[in-house]
Amino acid sequence: MLDAGNLEILWSAKFDTFSALPPLVAGDLLLIPTRDSGRSTECAVLHALGLDDGGVRWEQAFDHARFSGLVAVAPDVILVSLTSADLLRGTGALLALDAAGEERWRWTAAVQRVSAPAVAGDTVYFTVDTHTLVILDLASGQERACVPLAANASFAAPALVDGVVYLPCRGPQLLVLTPQGELHWRFDLDAAGSTWLSKTPLVHDARLFTVSNRGEVLALARRDGALQWRVKIGPVGKPLTAPISDGERLYIGARDGLYALDLSDGRAAWHFPTARKIDPQARPVVHNGVVYATCHDRHLYALDAATGKELWPPYTVERRLELPPVLATCGAAGPCVIVADRGGALTAIARPPSAAKHPMLSPLSFADLEIRLFARQEMGYPV
């Protein structure tokens, strides 16, 4: 039987602070975006660690900047979005780095805010200052098009599927564009002006799934944006994580735990309650029948995707978890899950490759059981 104290810790690292972006796997490297405010100016610093041992391979600093996006297109192509941290001296930019952290190209203009990028084939898509879509050549960084938008785009990455661009917005809209940036269709949610559809949407088969900052999950037809279903989950009016799916269910983190929804109608397949909220930025990860989720209660959870049952007791860190878990291969040690807590601690934990390989949950101690029952009572669940 496995208990949380017997989980194998492969390596750990410590930083002063993290940015709002999660770590990113790029080949055999783990990229860690951090903030450095100890200098005379705010600085964004990208650290590249070896996945085998957590040792630093290289670091790259960007003055007057904050990270707003990080994407690994291939092990040797890393796209970095930078938003100005100083309106007088900084400008927004998108740049490409190689596997050694050296700059290949840089796109910049008279802009302040640059969204996370998305890539389809040899083309990069991102938005700037909420009102413009920029399309670049991936190899050279040359601008192919600059398209004004009919709504305010968010800073989340667009979703790109089959040549169609799905843009999340800082408002109750979703814009769907052709590869050239022409409007294909637009969805407007019947909601108050304070409602945003700002998370990157998920496209699966004939539907598109998105969440609002008011606790709603929506399914739209990919062809024309017709509303298929709309459900509320979690406490009323509270934000959700971006959705993920394994093709069987939709998984979403909320203030009161993790939800699995039926793709066809949004019906809740299961709900795993947590004592504190799952951060809206901490989207869960699903792989080989296991859902991994982090939570403000300082726990990393591993749940059976079909049932929501715990596959191991939660692993507890020192400070709360606000970023999603990262799945990787940690060198010869094999599959691992990496978590980063609010205190700057980074931990790589060995993980079984699938739900079938996970040991069954060992019996809870009486003290553990009391804690769980108290948490459920506090949230109004029957015990």
Image (cartoon, helix red, strand yellow):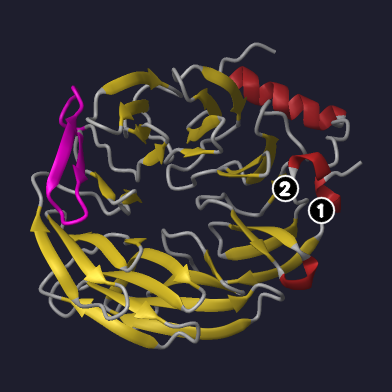
Residue 98 image position (x, y, % from top left)? 44, 83
Which quarter of the rendered picture does the C terminus lie within?
A: top right
Residue at 22% across, 30% down: 224
Lower position in the chain sequence, tag 1 or tag 2: 1
Q: In this figure, which residue is indicated by the disc labeled 1?
A: 7
The quarter of the image holding the N terminus is top right
Q: Is residue 345 left or right of residue 40?
A: right
Tell me the quarter of the picture where residue 13 sits: bottom right
The residue sitting at 73% across, 34% down in the picture is 310
Mark 1 belongs to which amino acid?
Leu
Q: Is residue 294 visible?
A: yes
Q: Amino acid at mark 2?
A: Tyr
Residue 224 magenta-highlighted: no
Height in image: 216 above or below 346?
Answer: above
In the rendered view, tell whether residue 146 sits above or below residue 186. below
Q: Nearer the viewer, residue 87 or 264?
A: 264
Q: Farthest right residue? A: 1
Query: Which residue is drawn at the image coordinates 40% and 79% (left, top)?
Result: 38
Which range is magenta? 173-194
- Residue beneath label 2, please? 315
Residue drawn 58% across the image and 20% down it? 269
Task: Specify whether 53 is left or right of 175.
Answer: right
Q: Nearer the viewer, residue 61 or 267?
A: 267
- Label 1 and label 2: CA atoms lie apart by 8 Å
Residue 137 at x, y = what percent? 25, 73
Around disc 2, counting alpha carbons within 10 Å, would you say few (fewer than 14), some (14 to 19), or many (20 or more)? some
Task: Indicate the position of residue 265 as horizontal and vertical percent values.
Answer: 44, 17
Is residue 186 in the magenta section?
yes
Q: Are marks 1 and 2 in contact (CB under 8 Å)?
A: yes
